[in-house]
Amino acid sequence: MKGVAQIRDSHPITLDNSEPEPDIAIVRLPETIYRNHHPYSQDIYWLIEVSNKTLKKDLEEKIITYARNRIPEYWVIDLKNKKLIVHTEPHNSRYLQIIEFKSGTITSQAFPKIKINLEKLLLY
């Protein structure tokens, strides 16, 4: 996503009461602003967690924090069950829309022109 966003892997983000380290954070540019601080919630397009042993925490704990901080899109890649769980429309401490995908192609709300093949994402 050169010139559009920065993809950060396993780096902290700064939210209201914590600094979690999502597996992937797609954040606004310019990346130079993150020299002095981690991305804030308003800097984040979407977050991705790759879950195997952390699935329960990702779906029960992190989801509350991310929704409360109005992260617009939160993806959980469930490796064990081979599915992608997409959370959108944050409201208070939950997401109003949750959709599961097992195959096909998906796009992010932030970058609808970029198509992601789920078979590659889910490691089939």
Image (spheres, rainbow, N blue to C red):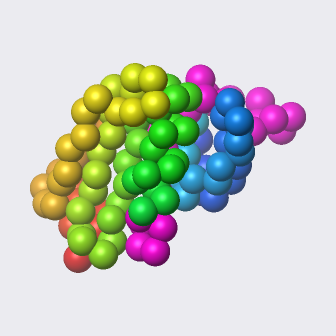
In the image shown, does 55 or 11 lie closer to the viewer? 55
Q: Residue at x 33, y 26 (%)?
A: 89
Q: In this view, does 116 lie to the left or right of 68?
A: left
Q: In this view, does 84 lie above or below 71?
A: below
Q: Where is residue 40 in the image (x, y as percent from the top left)?
A: 67, 30
User: The magenta stretch spans which residues?
Assistant: 29-55
In the image shown, does 45 or 81 lie closer to the viewer? 81
Q: How many marks?
A: 0
Q: Where is residue 25 in the image (x, y as percent from the top left)?
A: 55, 46
Q: In this view, does 94 lie above or below 99?
A: above
Q: In which quarter of the image is residue 88?
A: top left
Q: In this view, does 72 lie to the left or right of 100?
A: right
Q: Which residue lies furthest to the right in this view?
A: 36
Q: Say whether residue 31 is visible.
A: no
Q: Where is residue 45 in the image (x, y as percent from the top left)?
A: 48, 32
Q: Which residue is drawn at 41% across and 42% down?
A: 74
Q: In which quarter of the image is residue 120?
A: bottom left
Q: In this view, does 76 lie to the left or right of 26?
A: left
Q: In which quarter of the image is the C terminus?
A: bottom left
Q: Residue at x 59, y 23 (%)?
A: 42
In the image shown, does 103 or 7 lie closer to the viewer? 103
Q: Say whether residue 53 is visible.
A: yes
Q: Which residue lies furthest to the left in this view?
A: 104
Asked if residue 38 lies in the magenta stretch, the reply is yes
Q: Residue at x 46, y 56 (%)?
A: 58
Asked if residue 41 lies in the magenta stretch, the reply is yes
Q: Is residue 65 above or below residue 81?
A: above
